[in-house]
Image: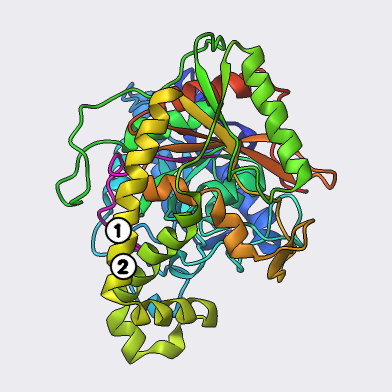
Amino acid sequence: MQPYELSLTAAADAIRSRRLSPVELVDSVLDRIEQVEPDLGAYVTVAAEQARRAAREAEREAVQGRYRGPLHGIPMGLKDLIDVAGMATTASSRVRADHRAPADSTVAARLTAAGAVLVGKTHTHEFAFGLTTPQTRNARDHGRVAGGSSGGSAVAVASGAATFALGTDTGGSIRVPAALNGVVGLKPTYGLVPRHGVTSLSWSLDHVGPITRTVEDAALVLTALAGHDPRDPASLSLPAEDYRPGTGTDLTGLRVGVPRTYYFDHVDPQVETAVRHAVEHLEGLGARLVEVDIPMTRYIQATQWGLMVPEAAVYHERTLRTAPELYGADVRILLEAGELMSAGDYLRAQRARTMMREEWAGLLETVDVIAAPTVPTTAVRAGQETVTWPDGTVESVSDAYVRLSAPANITGVPALTVPAGQDAEGLPIGLQLLGRPLGERTLLRVGHAYEQTQPVRGLTTVS
């Protein structure tokens, strides 16, 4: 096994025991980037020399006994919405072609302090406003979409071009590409991870979180990220916590909600079969399955778009008026639509969100987690614009991909996606676990138990 193939947890163990040096690991990942990047297009910027300098410093610290923790010397990618001092934050857009970040974002600073080594900035769907990331190709099948908007981060992790990466999630943008590329993605509780220095799509829906190869990896990254920052008005003031899930796989007494409504409507039969098998597996680990009804389902997508589109339009108001030609057509249309929405429509969406949060709080009193598909279909072919369901219903790809992930953004609850098999064409399928606000430890425990009792997985990329 090459160093780039190691999970974060395995690499951290090897570095701590001096069986692997940060220099060896970073060099292996940079070599892997050089090998796969022409086919995948995961990166906007590769910071090879900067990464090698940081790796040499991490090695010196390790030799001197100054070990910073499990992220010491670990190569990471950051979605190109996340500021790193002196580097471009392009948001994969011509609008930001000349931008340079004046300072580190909170999350970049925390990861660097924990010893992580930045190898590059990963592509996003322009300003995170899309679910496909057209610049980037799926790690399993280069003719298919990577998912978005954190497609570059998911593909980098899935292909070995980063040991872990950060994404952002406004309507599913961590979980969708993670599921489509066969890796783990965590959207934390709203406010748990600060967003200072992260380009916004929709301030009341935006989250930052990790994309990793294993659930334990995600827990290690979350432990480094979480914590109050007064520069983010939504940041929660909470004590530090260790999110590592432990080694147990016994889920006796845990109540797993299985939706009767919404989450299995208009879902590819292969996706449904895989997810229901995963749920049965949780039952085999001791969990008790409880059928639940998802509240206010008819309002979910209208509420998501009713919040996201006008908030995005306000953020881009000046540039949209002075240089609209710099935006891609798909993003510009959405921003212009946001300018046309009335204050009444936005307030109705806010009111619907408040009601939805209350209803979900009641639902989550009856179960500990909800288990459902992450996305209703696997990765579609590049350029495909619609999905046709067996009953003849036609849905846009964006609507299909956002439909099952949006509820966690609207309500702010944490959500985790873990690989749960593949379809007949070998394309990954994701199991989504949703929990109570600040219920990350439970989600990670369940995801880890499921993962540990499944066959060992390798990298998902084609050679």
Can the viewer see residue 115 in this picture? no
How many numbered marks does the figure carry?
2
- Between 331 and 151, the one lying in front of the other is 331
Element type at mark 1: helix
Q: Residues within 10 Å of mark 2 (few under 14, many from 20)?
A: many
In the figure, 183 relative to 344: above or below?
above
Q: Which residues are magenta?
A: 185-204
The x, y position of residue 102, in whole percent, is 24, 64
In the figure, 326 relative to 300: above or below?
below
- Between 133 and 30, the one lying in front of the other is 133
Q: Residues within 10 Å of mark 1 (few under 14, many from 20)?
A: some
Task: Quadrant for residue 399, please give it.
Answer: bottom right
Can the viewer see residue 178 in this picture? yes
Which residue is at a point 39% across and 66% down the rendered structure image?
306
Label disc, if present, on residue 346 of the rendered structure: 2
Label disc, if present, on residue 350 of the rendered structure: 1
Three-letter code for the amino acid on which mark 2 is drawn: Tyr
- Between 133 and 90, the one lying in front of the other is 133
- Mark 2 and mark 1 in contact (Cβ < 8 Å)? yes
